[in-house]
Amino acid sequence: MPDLTDVLDHVLQLAHLVQADLARFEREQGLTTSRVHLLWVLGTTGPTTQQVLASALDVTPRNVTGLVDGLVASGHVTREPHPGDRRATLVTTTQLGSRAVHDLRASHAELAARLFGDVPERRLATFDQVLAATVQRFADLVEDDATGPAPS
Amino acid sequence: MPDLTDVLDHVLQLAHLVQADLARFEREQGLTTSRVHLLWVLGTTGPTTQQVLASALDVTPRNVTGLVDGLVASGHVTREPHPGDRRATLVTTTQLGSRAVHDLRASHAELAARLFGDVPERRLATFDQVLAATVQRFADLVEDDATGPAPS
DNA sequence: GGCATGTAGTGAATGTACTTCACTATGTGG
DNA sequence: CCACATAGTGAAGTACATTCACTACATGCC
């Protein structure tokens, strides 16, 4: 019977290591965590307004302006006019940006394979089920806290 | 047979949620992630020089100076003279700092209980074993990369 | 003792991420 | 047409983190 706190610590340790691996990728590409995050979202959604990006990244729109500035300077994205709304700009990946996203996906998949490739299938299935259930339970907890944290 | 990338994504999702919970704690205590991290280390090691803290946090000594400045200002730690080395200072938790560490530990344990308390013991054991083995494997990978990344 | 060399900590300058507040330009519903 | 909301940015400020230069102290060696 493993100590519950230890289990949580192991999750955090693993996350820390994965994050370190991501940092390695960032240095190689001359990017930063936040910019990679933005690029990643952009890669899954396609051209997007900065407002939508701000929601997706859970930061202020003002911050997105700065991140996009950096990515424009490094040649990973461009600001295109939004057809039908002259206030908005569509942040769009360049070829360089798309390749970075592609490489990131590949790096991510390779890491997953190196980490979990040798785990027996039944054990891995249990592992993922517990993990997914925990994420779900956590999301519910957050929901409850947001809805009624102190029902006196 | 779960997709390996999805498993890794679930790990990251959970880590993100846990981190969000930590952020809640920080706001309550008027602290920040980096300062909490330093306090946490200090809580497990006892009074420590800034050099040692820099190693433990994996940041530059100069950065530790700034973090300690902030924690001194907020009354969580003090700088005490090092007996036997007048260059060094022993960063020491105040009562306020110790209580913050204690609260953090409690919050951490409570979160672990809320997340994993209902998971059947056998499944949780498998979960933790896979987790621990993965962390171990990852550490070995990093070690290999550091030792000889390109054995031509 | 005296001197070379290394170590502990900090000042100065810089870069990134992030925030709030104020402002402009544009869209939209009465 | 006007009130109001929305998209983006300038200005100013905080926190984290870095490098480089510097001071104070420790230590080994002759």
Image: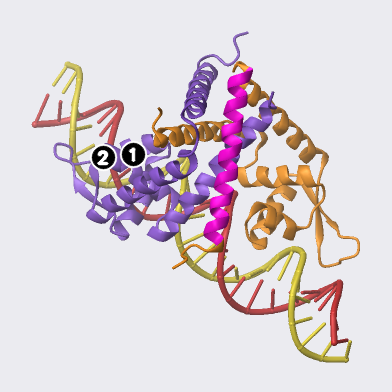
Chain colours: A orange, B purple, C red, D yellow
Q: Residue at x 58, y 49 (%)?
A: A139
Image location (x, y in percent) of residue C3: 21, 29
Kindly tell me whether residue A93 is visible in this rendering: yes
Look at the image and say whether residue B72 sits in the magenta stretch: no
Give the amino acid type for the residue marked by disc 1 in the picture.
Leu
Say if A55 sits above or below B56 in the image.
below
Residue B48's label in the rendered image is: 2
Q: Residue A18, how many percent across, how many down?
A: 56, 32
Work out whether residue D21 or residue A1 is closer to the camera in this orientation and state it: A1
| A115 left or right, relative to A149 | right
Q: In the image, is residue B144 above or below residue A128?
A: above
Q: Element at badge 1?
A: helix
> Which chain hosts label 1?
B
Stretch of the chain drawn in magenta:
A121-146
Which numbered disc covers residue B53?
1
Closest to the observer, A2 or D10 = A2
Report helix, strand or loop for mark 2: loop
Say which label, 2 or 1, has the lower sequence index: 2
Q: Position of residue B86 (x, y in %)?
A: 18, 41
B97 lies above or below A124: below
The type of residue carrying mark 2 is Thr
| CB within 8 Å, label 2 to label 1 | yes
Side of C7 where B26 appears, left or right: right
